[in-house]
Image: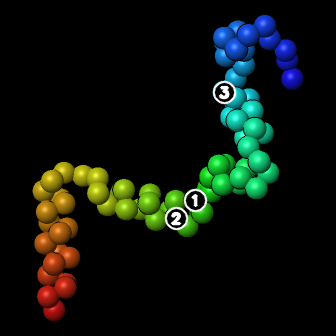
């Protein structure tokens, strides 16, 4: 770790990941896992990607797709 004269000089030269690391180290060991956040699983990312692809496109295509879905539900 590098020693700086003040916090401003530290913020000027240190990369962002070190600030995050310092914030995590200040927390109690039991709280560290909670603050780091849980990453989304591979399946969740794939589902989100697939849903986003469905939403893209022109309004006309979206309306056509919606009408098709509603037609299937009525049967």
**In terms of image quadrants, where is residue 61?**
bottom left
Taking the spot 17% from the left edge, 75% from the top edge, the residue there is: 68
**Mark number for residue 16?**
3
The quadrant the C terminus occupies is: bottom left
Local SS, label 3: helix
Taking the spot 52% from the left edge, 59% from the top edge, the residue there is: 45
- Please name the residue that numbered disc 2 is placed on: 44
Whether the residues at callouts 2 and 1 have beta carbons within 8 Å, the answer is yes
Image height of 4 relative to 54, above or below: above
**Mark number for residue 40?**
1
- Closer-to-camera residue (47/25): 25
Taking the spot 36% from the left edge, 56% from the top edge, the residue there is: 52
- Across and down, in percent, residue 58 comes to 19, 51
Local SS, label 1: loop
Crowd band around label 1 with a 10 angstrom C-alpha radius: few (<14), some (14–19), many (20+): few
Q: How far apart are marks 3 and 2 (CA)?
A: 27 Å
Crowd band around label 3 with a 10 angstrom C-alpha radius: few (<14), some (14–19), many (20+): few
Can residue 54 be seen in this snapshot?
A: yes
- Across and down, in percent, residue 49 comes to 44, 57
Q: How far apart are marks 2 and 1 (CA)?
A: 6 Å
Local SS, label 2: helix
Mark nearer the N terminus (3 vs 2): 3
Can residue 13 be seen in this snapshot?
A: no
Taking the spot 78% from the left edge, 7% from the top edge, the residue there is: 5
Q: How far apart are marks 3 and 1 (CA)?
A: 22 Å
Q: In this view, does 21 lie to the left or right of 60?
A: right
Image height of 43 relative to 61, above or below: below
- Across and down, in percent, residue 9 comes to 70, 9
């Amino acid at each position: 770790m590098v020693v700086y004269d003040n916090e401003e000089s530290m913020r000027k030269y240190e990369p962002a990941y070190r600030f995050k690391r310092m914030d995590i180290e200040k927390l109690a060991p039991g709280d560290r896992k909670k603050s780091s956040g849980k990453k989304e699983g591979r399946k969740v990312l794939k589902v989100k990607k697939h849903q986003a692809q469905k939403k893209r496109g022109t309004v006309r295509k979206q309306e056509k797709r919606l009408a098709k879905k509603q037609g299937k539900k009525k049967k």
